[in-house]
Image (cartoon, rainbow, N blue to C red):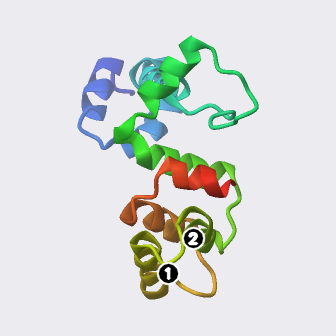
Amino acid sequence: MLLPYEIIIEISNYIPSLHHNKIYLSNKYFFVLHKKKFLKNIHLIQHFYKKHKLPDDFLNVQIFINYDKYCKWQRISNRNNKIRIYRFIIVKNNLNDKYPELIMKKSCTMNSSRQLILKDWIKNNMPTESRTRRDLMNFFIVNRITLKEISNVGF
């Protein structure tokens, strides 16, 4: 004899959520409950990230930006979100292993203190053979690379 649905639901509240899929796949009634309980939250998270992601044509100089998009991008990419812009630049553009050296050469004047600091940091902290995205992200964050320096180099 099967247990009533109410008792099964009450028992499932004490089971970790990783094991819920076995219960919810067993019956259509439980599957509908699962949709109501979890999938609604998933859609909320997806909607939030779609609304607040940086568009593909962000930082593209050749595209005219109307005022609404400009305000939205300023809100998304304000001074507190430099890390998001760094991620965008690293992901959307296949940056080669020599990108930190390019920033050092093209955006800093010769023998300036900024160039010497970057040169010393690259020498001591960056691997020489293969650099990962994490290495580039650390370079951007620790050295506080500005958007002006990135736009001077190009990508």
Q: Quadrant of residue 13?
A: top left
How far is disc 1 from disc 2 in space, using C-alphas?
9 Å
| Quadrant the C terminus occupies | bottom right
Name the residue: 40% across, 65% down.
143
In percent of width and height, residue 64 lies at: 70, 22
Name the residue: 45% across, 22% down.
44
| Circles 1 and 2 in contact, beta carbons < 8 Å | yes
Question: Mark on residue 38?
Answer: none
**Vertical position of residue 38 compared to residue 151: above or below:** above
Image-based side of 31 in relation to 93, left or right: left
Name the residue: 50% across, 71% down.
135
Say whether disc 1 or disc 2 marks the residue closer to the N-terminus.
2
Specify the amino acid type for callout 1. Answer: Met
Q: Residues within 10 Å of mark 2 (few under 14, many from 20)?
A: many
SS state under label 1: loop
**Vertical position of residue 94 compared to residue 105: above or below:** above
The residue that mark 2 highlights is 100
Image-based side of 113 in relation to 72, left or right: left
Residue nearest the viewer, comparing 139 with 62: 62
* Residue 3 seen in the figure: yes
Name the residue: 47% across, 73% down.
115
Specify the amino acid type for callout 2. Answer: Pro
The residue that mark 1 highlights is 126
In percent of width and height, residue 130 lies at: 63, 81
SS state under label 2: helix
Q: Quadrant of residue 128?
A: bottom right
Q: Residues within 10 Å of mark 1 (few under 14, many from 20)?
A: some
Residue positioned most to the right: 62
